[in-house]
Image (cartoon, grey):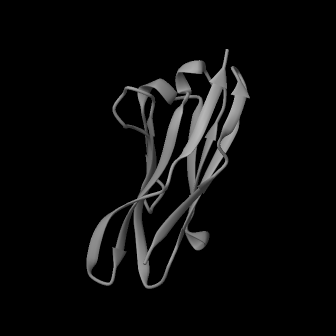
Amino acid sequence: QVQLVESGGGLVQAGGSLRLSCTASGSAFSINAMGWYRQAPGKQRELVAAITKGGSTNYADSVKGRFTISRDNARNTVHLQMNSLKPEDTADYYCNAVITVFTATRNYWGQGTQVTVSS
């Protein structure tokens, strides 16, 4: 059984920073791509940032230059450093990982962590 556990959400003023972390735990698994998604009230879940096992990154246009995704493969962890936060960044943030367990590969999701940016 593989689980993704997130941490680091909270309340911050506009212009502030937060760092989200997500760690995968379990046994006999291999992590491929990892990423962060977010879902604001009344909106669809959207990709924020993703990173491959080799370190290639991809960002939503709305966060480019403000957010940085990174990963520590030895610790099965992905981070999202969020700077210059805006009220429109307010959402529930979900960690996502493409994980292979033995021969089965699928998406795994964290439970979500809330980020609130006040104006």
Q: Residue at x 26, y 76 (%)?
A: 104
In the figure, is residue 20 to the left or right of 3?
right
Which residue is at the front of the view, 10 or 77? 10
Numbered circles on residues, count: 0
Which residue is at the front of the view, 92 or 81? 92
In the figure, is residue 29 to the left or right of 77?
left
Q: Residue at x 42, y 26 (%)?
A: 61
Above or below, comparing residue 23 to residue 57 in the picture: below
Q: Hey, which residue is sitting farthest top in the picture?
A: 119
In the figure, is residue 53 to the left or right of 5?
left
Q: Where is the C terminus found, in terms of image quarters?
A: top right
Q: Hey, which residue is sitting farthest front in the picture?
A: 42
Q: Where is the N terminus found, in terms of image quarters?
A: bottom left
Estimate the x, y position of residue 75 in percent, counting from the top left. 61, 70
Q: Residue at x 51, y 42 (%)?
A: 93
Above or below, comparing residue 36 to residue 62 in the picture: below
Estimate the x, y position of residue 55 in percent, counting from the top left. 48, 56
Above or below, comparing residue 19 to residue 95 in the picture: above
In the figure, is residue 110 to the left or right of 103?
right
Give residue 15's quadrant in the image: top right
Give residue 38's quadrant in the image: top left
Estimate the x, y position of residue 95 in percent, counting from the top left. 48, 52
Which residue is at the front of the view, 110 or 82? 110
Above or below, comparing residue 116 to residue 31 in the picture: above
Estimate the x, y position of residue 94 in percent, counting from the top left. 48, 47
